[in-house]
Image (tube, grey):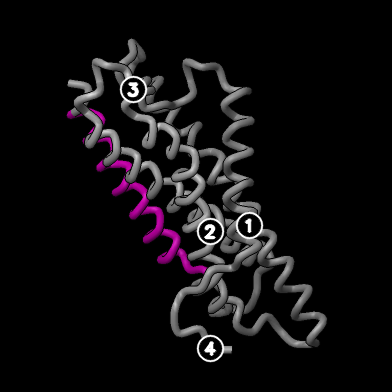
Amino acid sequence: MKLPFAQLHGPLFVTTVFGTLVLARLLALAIPTDFYFTFQSLFSDRTPQSILVSLIGKMAAPLAVGLALGLWCIAAWQRAARTRGGARHGFARRVRFVFGPTAFAGGFFAAFVAAWPAMIYWDLMANPALAHLKLAFFGLYVLYMLGFGYVTLLGLLLAVYLREHWQQGPPGSESVSMRELSRVGALWLLNSGLAAAAMKVLTE
């Protein structure tokens, strides 16, 4: 089956969204408040180091979900290949046009769902001292959503890459190359850099 453009895998998308939300919530309960990132914490007395640590912790949920998705995709495709009696033909194409976009969209939408109440009820929930920064915070929320999407995608690609290299398949049979991993990682770093720059401007 040819896939001329990206398509979303419905069950995988739903699993990604709710898996990320549930795991993020569990981490929020397990991690001390001083080390769990919120946008309001930018205006607290935290040190830049603790903000960085808490932001990394915030990204742990989508990364873990992405890794789990990658392992599931490999296992599901291998089962299907054995059933059909063939090799894993077309898996790389599915990763590129179905599994990857689904992981990114799922991570993005999970962050959107998590941020939605704060965005909708900004005028009621926001600290009055920060009310005038509404548009700036909305911009940070968008970067936050993109960050979740890229980290989820990075986790999926990393899982596929490590699993295939661990199995040591024939040269040229990899579904994910180091170049592709580097590209997604660079996009995430660029997004994080923009977010960090915006945070610095807002908190100065």
Q: Earlier in the sequence, mark 2 or mark 3?
A: 2
Of tags 3 and 4, the one toward the viewer is 3
Q: Mark 4 — residue?
A: 2
Of the pair 29 and 154, the residue shown nearer to us: 29
Q: Amino acid at mark 1?
A: Leu
Instruction: Estimate the spatial distance between the alpha carbons at disc 2 and disc 3, rounded to whole Å.
Output: 31 Å
Q: Amino acid at mark 3?
A: Ala
Q: Earlier in the sequence, mark 2 or mark 4?
A: 4
| Rendered location of residue 28, percent (x, y) | 57, 26
Q: Are marks 1 and 2 in contact (CB under 8 Å)?
A: yes
Relative to 179, 159 lies left or right? right
| Rendered location of residue 23, percent (x, y) | 62, 38
| Residues drawn in magenta | 176-201
What secondary structure is found at the residue carrying circle 3? loop
Q: Mark 2 — residue?
A: 103
Q: Mark 3 — residue?
A: 126
Q: Is residue 169 above or below residue 42?
A: below
Instruction: Estimate the spatial distance between the alpha carbons at disc 3 and disc 1, rounded to whole Å.
Output: 35 Å
Q: Amino acid at mark 4?
A: Lys
Q: Residues within 10 Å of mark 3 (few under 14, many from 20)?
A: some
Q: Is residue 160 above or below residue 90?
A: above
